[in-house]
Amino acid sequence: MQAPPTSNGTAALALTRPLDHGPEPTIPISEGAARLLGATAVLAIGLIHILDAAGTYSGTRWIFWAYMAVIIASVPVALVLLHSASPLAWGAAAAVAAGPFVGYLWSRAVGLPGDAPDIGNWLCTLGMVALFVESSLIALCATRLEMWRRSVRGSLHGGRLGKATK
């Protein structure tokens, strides 16, 4: 940025563009592609829990019903995500992923009521797949929500954040 000389010969710095708040975020994929990827991940979480639900019915009934809640929630959340770029859709997708993610970690670390045999069973193949899909979806949701927050912040200031006034 060039500083134009003033009447007394010294240079004064005039802000002619928004203050630098770090590099502009790059958009590696379009909103539509991100929503499709998110909806696919939400449905994958539902499918993973369908595959694992049968084993929980006879042992720990409340975990079975928690699985059913995840399975049932995954369909409308995926549909909303496909049809809306709303931050609420991304938040719902993050919730569908975060619930089972925390539940898996808790069940393996300290155990869930009525499910002590899973303590320390970290290498369950289906559980590892679920953790991968859930953590990936949480990361995608966080990224899309941050991009939405930045776009709202930019539009509230009308693109004039930090501009000099005359």
Image (spheres, rainbow, N blue to C red):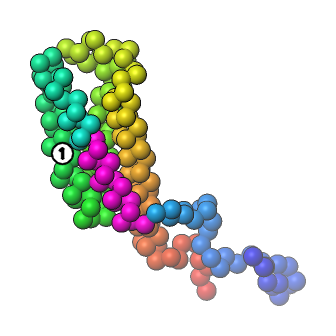
Residue extending furthest top?
A: 117
> Quick check: is 42 in the magenta stretch?
yes
Please name the residue shown 47% across and 70% down the image: 154
Please name the residue shown 15% across and 43% down the image: 72
Residue 157, image x and y in percent? 46, 73
Q: Is residue 159 above or below residue 47?
A: below
In terms of secondary structure, what is the magenta stretch mainly?
A: helix
Q: Quadrant of the C terminus?
A: bottom right
Regarding residue 88, the answer to whether it shows in the image is no
Q: The magenta stretch spans which residues?
A: 30-45
Residue 95, image x and y in percent? 28, 43
7 vs 112, left or right, is right
Residue extending furthest right?
A: 9
Q: Nearer the viewer, residue 18 or 35?
A: 35
104 vs 150, left or right, is left
Please name the residue shown 29% across and 34% down the image: 100
Q: Residues within 10 Å of mark 1 (few under 14, many from 20)?
A: some
- Give, as a three-letter code, the residue at label 1: Ala
Regarding residue 152, the answer to whether it shows in the image is yes
Residue 41, image x and y in percent? 32, 48
Q: How many marks?
A: 1
The quarter of the displayed image where residue 8 is located: bottom right
Residue placed under numbered mark 1 in the picture: 73
The quarter of the displayed image where residue 10 is located: bottom right
Q: Secondary structure at mark 1?
A: helix
Q: Quadrant of the N terminus?
A: bottom right
